[in-house]
Image: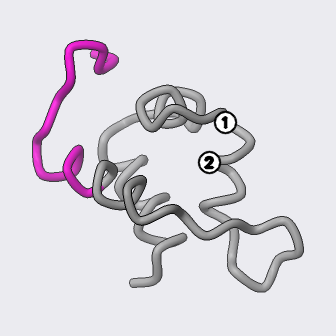
Amino acid sequence: MKNHEKIKFIRKELGLTQKQLGALIDTDAQTVRRLEMSPDKKTARNPAPRMMRLIVAYSEGYRPKDYPM
């Protein structure tokens, strides 16, 4: 699974909106949309390695104090 697919899958698996995931990784919903885009799209963005580590940590059960319930 490619990063853009993995981000979207994890976000949906966690029941988060793009805005909520953005808040957790310290970015905005528009950036999350771009991270979830196919890499062949002009405005698509690759996630920073630290973003991917954090998103994967959420999928593995990590929950910070400000995690939306």
- Amino acid at pointer 1: Ala
Residue 68 sits inside the magenta stretch: yes
Question: In this picture, is 36 found above or below 5?
Answer: above
| Whole-percent x, y for residue 45 in the image | 69, 66
Circles 2 and 1 in contact, beta carbons < 8 Å: yes
- Which quarter of the image is occupied by the N terminus? bottom left
- Label 2 SS: helix
* 16 with respect to 66 (left or right): right
Residue appearing at x 62%, y 48% in the figure: 32
Residue at 26% from the left image edge and 57% from the top image edge: 56
Above-or-below relation of 39 to 46: below
The residue positioned 29% from the left and 20% from the top of the image is 67
Q: In this rendering, would 2 be left or right of 13?
A: right
Q: Give the range drawn in magenta.
A: 56-69
Q: Residue 32 carries which label?
A: 2
Res 41 quadrant in image? bottom right
Q: Which of 52 and 18 is in front in this view?
A: 52
